């Protein structure tokens, strides 16, 4: 059973059988007395609606039609028992090949359905209540019709509770000899979308797809009492698919007031007595603490980090739990979830595409964490991918800039919530099955079943092919292939602007060993083509806009990237890969350990590593000597402040010492500073004198990605080129001083990606 945090979603996995005249209890129907909840129950329900001549037993096939009639008074009484409303009218509508001639009204108080003469077509009638428009159905058979109760062959029960606490039961039934099943919906601002598919030779219609839409519409009369945003949250179920799909559409119309959206997500809160085992990747799986374990623990430097002191499971005692320890890059965030041991059930969030995510492929984001909680998208939630989210990235990434009546609309998702189970107790089997399903979903993208016109299908999208080459004459006189380059289409902007974009869509891929790339499934729009190449600094942006139309097949040809370079490399520290993972990462302090990350490739996920700098450098700061020091051992992964008292932190200054035998005084040298992360930091550069009042260069205060506190190894990428006049250098030993000048907090600082000193071009 699952429950989401912001707009709760309950899933009952067990079938239910009810006697004639009985109603399903609220616990089974997913009813909760709390307000502002949306509840969906997927249990089997056979209601008490029958005709006098029919049997109460269910059909072997709930899709079969039979000749009979049901008095309208009985339908009305049943509907009234569900909704408290007796305002019912009868309106015949037909879908696909349903034949109107096969339906006749036998009296003013009855409606009948009968088998067609061909035994291949059934008849359906929609019983309607006053309510919202049925806005769209496949092939246009039903458009603009007031429908809130309709017949569908499903044999399922669904119940919603709107934001005012009003119950909206959506019930299907299948009674032998009576009628097709009924689905009823009477909440005004809820809509239901779906379609029938005929299988003529099987003499039945299959209801393969149901899509439910929950809408919230803003109007100017609300003023400051609501967000100037239209929200359309949708849930999709497909016949034979073990799970459901969900997506959302946000819209800010032209002329509407200014709007900020800091974060957007949908959160699934599972039962903590069932789901204890969490899996994010092959090497990031473990038994997790419960919410109650965390509440009874000791809070550390911030509320998300807790030392487990009295956990229910004693093997967890003394460990640190922090949801940020389980983050990962967008490109790696494809499937994550939870496993219950009794019964052996898996609950998985599968994200088949990053096109709606903000910040590009290497932006980090949350996944699953203790609760048990799994995060996906996309629901407006001011308190907490998750498609628009500024953890690990600056505030500019959030939608704080819908200003001056700017129109904006975006589809977030769909993502797939997958459920699996087996008779064993090995979590690996469910995890491996979830990975297989993730691969299936990824190959199916873009999906062909979402009914929103705002989600284009594959044949409405375009593809671009090309090749990226690198021109760096100090490495090779010939053009080099951009091996494994990240190449993407994102909204037009400056070089690297894709890092800060949350409004538009982005489409990324990896080039092959020869620099060739293909980006497919691109929505029609105007983009810039961006790229960056592991092993080289800087960002590439193609000069011309890329216009994608429906069905486009663009061959863009060879593109050449000239990475920043003024002269030959005199020395370098690190690897230009936009992370600090190659530098020294210490073990956590005793008593502040997460056992998952012991001897792990991601040991930077351990809590409290910022204070380990003080342990290693209690009085003197880091000094790195080019040609002697090893950055893997001697360069701390984060340039942080030193702790000198319980809550007092002071700035630190690092030194890089290097020799130049023959300085060309009349020429300039270039210092390249590539930063993998910055959190409210300022890096000041001084040359050969640490005490000058003014620094030779300063980044000024930059960054809000908070990667240091949240156990990341990178955040937003920054690149600075610092001109160093030869007159400031000396023959022999020189020192560059890097001061992170902002103190007061353990979390203020930077992570370096790569540092290089280039000589003059004549050298």
Image (cartoon, rainbow, N blue to C red):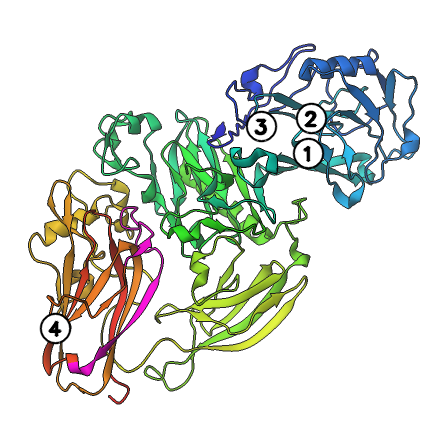
Task: Find residue 219 and report its image quarter.
Answer: top right
Q: Identify the mark nearer the N-term, 1 or 2.
A: 2
Please provide the residue range marked out in magenta: 701-727
Q: Residue shown at 82%/35% (left/top)?
A: 203
Residue 298 on the magenta segment? no
Residue 688 numbered mark, or none: 4
* Pair 1/4: label in front: 4
Which quarter of the rendered picture does the C terminus lie within? bottom left
Q: Which residue is painted at 39% across and 27% down in the image?
A: 272
Q: CA distance from mark 4 to mark 3?
A: 67 Å
Determine whether label 4 and label 3 are within 8 Å by CB.
no
Q: Residues within 10 Å of mark 1 (few under 14, many from 20)?
A: many
First-in-chain label (2 vs 4): 2
Q: Would you name the residue on which mark 3 appears?
A: 40
Residue identified by numbered label 2: 185
Which residue in the protein does label 1 denote? 192
């Amino acid at each position: 059973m699952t429950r989401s945090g912001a707009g709760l979603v309950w899933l009952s996995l067990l079938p239910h059988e009810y006697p004639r005249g009985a109603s399903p209890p609220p616990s089974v129907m997913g009813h909760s007395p709390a307000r502002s909840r949306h509840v969906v129950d997927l249990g089997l329900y056979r209601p008490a609606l029958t005709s006098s001549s029919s049997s109460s037993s269910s059909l072997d096939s709930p899709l079969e039609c039979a000749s009979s009639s049901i008095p309208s008074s009985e339908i009305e009484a049943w509907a009234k028992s569900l909704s408290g409303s007796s305002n019912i009218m009868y309106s015949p509508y037909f879908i696909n090949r349903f034949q109107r001639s096969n339906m006749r009204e036998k009296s003013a108080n009855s409606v009948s359905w009968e088998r067609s003469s061909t035994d291949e077509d059934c008849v359906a009638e929609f019983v309607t209540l006053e309510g919202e428009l049925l806005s769209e159905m496949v092939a246009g058979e039903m458009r603009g019709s007031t429908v809130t109760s309709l017949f569908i062959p499903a044999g399922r029960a669904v119940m919603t509770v709107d934001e005012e606490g009003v119950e909206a039961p959506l019930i299907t039934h299948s009674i032998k000899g009576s009628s097709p099943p009924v689905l009823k919906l009477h909440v005004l601002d809820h809509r239901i979308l779906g379609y029938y598919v005929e299988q003529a030779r099987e003499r039945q219609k299959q209801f393969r797809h149901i899509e439910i839409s929950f809408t919230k519409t803003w109007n100017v009369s609300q003023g400051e009492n609501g967000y100037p945003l239209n929200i359309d949250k949708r849930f999709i179920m497909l016949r034979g698919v073990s799970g459901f799909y969900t997506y959302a559409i946000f819209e800010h119309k032209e002329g509407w007031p200014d709007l900020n959206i800091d974060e957007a997500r949908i959160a699934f809160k599972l039962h903590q007595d069932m789901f204890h085992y969490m899996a994010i990747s092959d090497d990031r799986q473990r038994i997790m603490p419960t919410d109650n374990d965390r509440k009874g623990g000791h809070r550390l430097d911030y509320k998300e980090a807790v030392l487990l002191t009295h956990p229910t499971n004693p093997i967890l005692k003394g460990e640190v739990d922090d949801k940020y320890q389980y983050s990962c890059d967008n490109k790696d965030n494809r499937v994550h979830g939870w496993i219950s041991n009794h019964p052996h059930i898996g609950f998985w969030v599968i994200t088949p595409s990053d096109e709606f995510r903000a910040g590009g492929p290497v932006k980090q984001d949350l996944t699953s964490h203790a609760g048990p909680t799994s995060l996906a998208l996309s629901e407006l939630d001011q308190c907490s991918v998750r498609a628009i989210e500024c953890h690990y990235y600056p505030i500019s990434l959030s939608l704080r800039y819908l200003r001056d009546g700017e129109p904006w609309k975006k589809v977030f998702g769909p993502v797939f919530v997958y459920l699996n189970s087996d008779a064993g107790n090995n979590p690996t089997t469910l995890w491996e099955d979830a990975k297989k399903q993730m691969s299936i979903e990824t190959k199916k993208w873009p999906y062909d079943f979402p009914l929103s016109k705002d989600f284009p299908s594959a044949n409405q999208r375009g593809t671009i092919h090309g090749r990226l080459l690198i021109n760096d004459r100090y490495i090779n006189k010939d053009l080099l292939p951009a091996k494994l380059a990240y190449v993407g289409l994102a909204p037009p902007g400056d070089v690297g602007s894709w890092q800060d974009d949350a409004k538009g869509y982005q489409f990324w891929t990896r080039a092959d060993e020869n620099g060739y790339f293909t980006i497919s499934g691109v929505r029609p729009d105007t983009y810039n083509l961006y790229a960056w190449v592991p092993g080289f600094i800087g960002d590439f942006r193609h000069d011309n806009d890329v216009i994608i139309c429906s069905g486009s097949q663009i061959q863009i040809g060879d593109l050449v990237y000239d990475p920043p370079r003024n002269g030959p490399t005199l020395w370098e520290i690190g690897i230009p890969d936009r992370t600090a993972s190659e530098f020294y990462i210490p073990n956590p302090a005793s008593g502040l350990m997460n056992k998952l990350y012991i001897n792990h490739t991601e040991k930077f996920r351990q809590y409290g590593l910022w204070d380990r700098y003080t342990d290693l450098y209690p009085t003197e700061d880091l000094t790195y000597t080019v040609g002697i020091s090893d950055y893997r051992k001697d360069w701390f992964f984060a340039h942080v402040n030193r702790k000198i008292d319980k809550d007092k932190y002071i700035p630190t200054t690092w030194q890089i010492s290097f020799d130049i035998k023959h300085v060309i005084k009349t020429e300039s040298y270039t210092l390249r500073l590539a930063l993998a992360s910055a959190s409210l930091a300022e890096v000041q550069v001084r040359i050969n004198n640490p005490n000058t009042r003014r620094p030779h260069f300063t980044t000024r205060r930059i960054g809000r990605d908070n990667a240091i506190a949240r156990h990341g190894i990178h955040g937003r990428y920054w690149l600075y080129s610092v001109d160093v006049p030869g007159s400031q250098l000396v023959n022999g030993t020189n020192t560059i001083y890097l001061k992170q000048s902002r103190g007061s907090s353990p979390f203020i600082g930077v992570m370096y990606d790569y540092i290089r000193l280039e000589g003059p071009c004549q050298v």
